[in-house]
Image: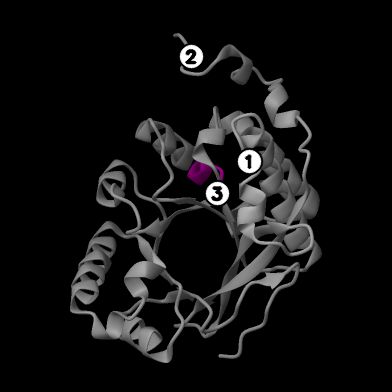
Amino acid sequence: MTSRFPQSLTGFDCKQCASPLDFDFSFAFQPIVDLRQGRIWGYEALVRGRHGESATSVLSRVNDNNRYAFDQLCRVKAITLAAALGLRQILSINFLPNAVYEPAHCIRSTLEAARQAGFPADRIMFEVAESERVPQPGHLTRIFEYYRSQGFITALDDFGSGHSGLTLLSCFLPTIIKIDMALIRDIPSNRAKQVIVTALLDICQQLDIKVLAEGIETAEELAWLEDRGVRLIQGYYFARPGFECLPHVSL
């Protein structure tokens, strides 16, 4: 069968994955809270410049020539730093689906980094933004299915920010969806958002998908979500991302 990818990207000696980057980066970590258990459930690794510069300053340097190497190094760096900081909860890592040409091969460096760091695969969550353009949705489905087979948690990030959310959800079922902060902002007083999020919560319950609400900034937003059974919460209300550290949360 003819490969869907260029020959240079299908062999196990992919030079683009091994190419050194001409810039460096690090991570900040933001806690994800489990309201039901009253504890930190996990941390999301958010890319930053080497001295704490914004994610934009790093991502603006990612292009078609280095995205494979960047995606691979992101995973390794996030796992290595999280382990060095003593993270014992879930580690959430964003990934670029268009930088994964063959799931089994592209995950090798991640598995090796986790093994060396003593970080179990079942404590790693891979999330991809709903707005991320994927020319072939079936490719993303294959990635998620393979990642789940390796014990990883899968998540669809920024759900509600793009135009294809429900279509994607009909193609594959992630472990978790993260409701975009734009739907959460001012939800206690916005009837339209309340109806949309309530319907989404019902869909997820029927499909056995966990919901994580992100971007929580006020006690009112938190109370509205908690009253409707949302268990996993992330946002400035609890803690801002900590550069190369794991912020604590008082619950």
Magenta run includes residue 148: yes
Identify whether 188 is placed above or below 47: below
State how far apart marks 3 and 2 are (Cα). 27 Å
Q: Position of residue 151 (x, y in %)?
A: 55, 49
* Disc 3 residue type (three-letter): Gly
Give the structural element (helix, strand or loop) at label 1.
loop
Give the structural element (helix, strand or loop) at label 3.
loop
Q: Which mark is residue 62?
A: 1
Camera sees residue 228: no
State how far apart marks 1 and 2 are (Cα). 25 Å
Residue 36 occupies which quadrant of the picture? Answer: bottom left
Q: Position of residue 207 (x, y in %)?
A: 27, 57
| Label 1 environment density (alpha carbons within 10 Å; few <14, some 14–19, many ≥20) | some
Identify whether 43 is placed above or below 161: below
**Residue placed most toward the observer, 43 or 60:** 60
Q: Which mark is residue 151?
A: 3
Q: Which mark is residue 3?
A: 2
Q: Please state which of the two labelled residues, at mark 3 or mark 2, is closer to the viewer.
A: 2
Question: Which residues fall within the magenta stretch?
Answer: 147-151
